[in-house]
Image (tube, rainbow, N blue to C red):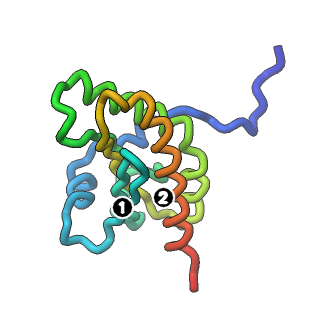
Amino acid sequence: MEPASSHQPSYRFPSAFRLKLKRLIRPLFDRSRSDVRTVTAGSIRIVYRIIPPEEAPLDAPLQIGFATGRNVKRAVDRNRAKRLMREAFRLNQHPVLDTLAALDGRMLTMMVIFRGSIYKAKYQIPLHLPTALKLLTDKIQEASTPL
């Protein structure tokens, strides 16, 4: 067998990408902040914020968290939806990471929220999350392009 070529993208989801710090999560849900933006595609809503390098805890280009809407009651269903979102993000992360390379050391914090029916999650998440990520990359490129 031939060794894997070095130019193939990695589909890993490193632990440095996980959004865990309360001081980074809380601002995403503060409605009075003007630096928090959102994109929506189908049953997926992405709330995001670009933070300066001095506020960033790690060298990671982004930190991401996953959550479900209040309509998903059982923990089993919430965990399943979050697992599906992590997998869909893992497979579609490269356009986002490529866009973040142009942010000059700034970091993206984002929360992906599933707001649909848990019974349709298996089909909606792999369909809607890549669309939402595309909208996100378009907005980031639009915001970082000088006039």
Q: Nearer the viewer, residue 10 or 74?
A: 74
Q: Quick one: quadrant of the C terminus?
A: bottom right
Q: Residue at x 43, y 52 (%)?
A: 41
What amino acid type is highlighted by mark number 2?
Leu
Q: CA distance from mark 1 to mark 2?
A: 8 Å
SS type, badge 2: helix
| Disc number for residue 38 | 1
Callout 1: SS: strand
Q: Give the answer, above or below, for where 147 lies relative to 78.
A: below
4 above or below 115?
above
The quadrant the N terminus occupies is top right
Characterize the local packing of mark 2: few (<14), some (14-19) or many (20 or more) Cα atoms within 10 angstroms.
Answer: many
For disc 2, the marked residue is 136
Q: Amino acid at mark 1?
A: Thr
Residue drawn at point x = 58 percent, y = 59 percent: 99
Percent from the top left, x then y, of residue 96? 54, 52
